[in-house]
Image (tube, rainbow, N blue to C red):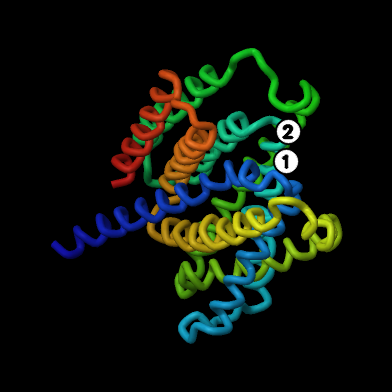
Amino acid sequence: MSERREPSRALTTGVLAGLGAGALWGLVFVAPHMAPGLSSLDLAAGRFVSYGLVSVLLLAVVPGARAWPSASQALWALGLSVLGFTGYYWLLVLAIRDAGTEVPTLIIGTIPLWVMLLGKPAGLRWAALLPGLAFTATGLVLMMHAQHDGSVPGDGPADFARGVFWAVAAMACWTAFSLLNATWLARHPEVSAATWANWLGLATGAGALALWLVFGTPAAELAARPGIGLAVVVCMATGLGSAWLATVLWNMASQQLPASLCGQLIVSETVFALLYSFVWDGRWPTLFQWAAGVLFTTGILFSIKAHR
């Protein structure tokens, strides 16, 4: 009986961790609106420098967290930090700047489809995945229809097209990160989810700091901008919650679940991002948007059932 319960417990733990990560990641889509005084690079750098500082603090102060990577592990952490953190979120902020919030949200929302297709376990039949894929794809179509009102976000078609390009590039980066990160964790079961999050944080923080020093706004100019206090709070909050804690939760999900199911759980990021966007804008979703949310949720449930 205990052997039967163990896979179920792992499934439940992994699903809850993945949903928690999605809820925290969704905050990233409204962060640029909460800190409009920061450029896309400054916002991404501030967030991930905060993530790096949290990781350094944990590694230096918490006795149980004092585990340092080897040279090979450090190189992996550096490469994955570019794909899943610094590079990805900088591209995402650029996309939101040029194309608005919801279109990039929808493009990023296709990541579950790509991860499910590319990360399917060898023993899982395609027929088992089709219901979840169908509900998710239909939800995306409905959401795109709901968002299409004939207007073009940004300053014109050129800006909007550039924003779409940034969003597609961000989607490709994070799809690669999800698959490679899950593969690395599977090959290194001795490394805990929190330890790997701290190592990724070190690499991410260092890369973000270097990027800001070269291309970012000078510190004196940033300090003189109105609303800089709120911007700092946004960077610190997203660095702790949407970066460090979300990474720990996602690593837990990646250790407990197949990549295809993890991919489906990324849909929760889209659902939460749209929810936060509606709350921030002070409006209710349309009928199509409600329907899309229901389809997304149904797709997740079907995918969980397929992986039991």
**In the depicted structure, whether residue 225 falls above or below residue 286:** below
Is residue 28 visible in this depiction of the protein?
Answer: yes
From mark 1 to mark 2, how far is it between C-alphas?
6 Å
Which x, y percent locates residue 82?
A: 69, 57
**In the depicted structure, whether residue 67 falls above or below residue 162:** below
Whether residue 89 sits left or right of residue 115 in the image: it is: right
How many numbered dots are placed on residues in this image? 2
> Which sits in the foreground, 159 or 295?
159
Q: Which residue is mark 2?
A: 98
> Which sits in the foreground, 304 or 218?
218
* Residue 94: image tag: 1
* Residue 136: image tag: none
Which x, y percent locates residue 295?
A: 38, 28
* Residue type beneath disc 1: Leu
Residue drawn at point x = 32 percent, y = 40 percent: 306
Disc 1 vs disc 2: Cβ atoms closer than 8 Å? yes
Which x, y percent locates residue 276?
A: 49, 39
Whether residue 17 sits left or right of residue 100 in the image: it is: left
Which x, y percent locates residue 267?
A: 46, 39
Residue drawn at point x = 39 percent, y = 56 percent: 17
Q: Secondary structure at mark 1?
A: helix
Q: Secondary structure at mark 2?
A: helix
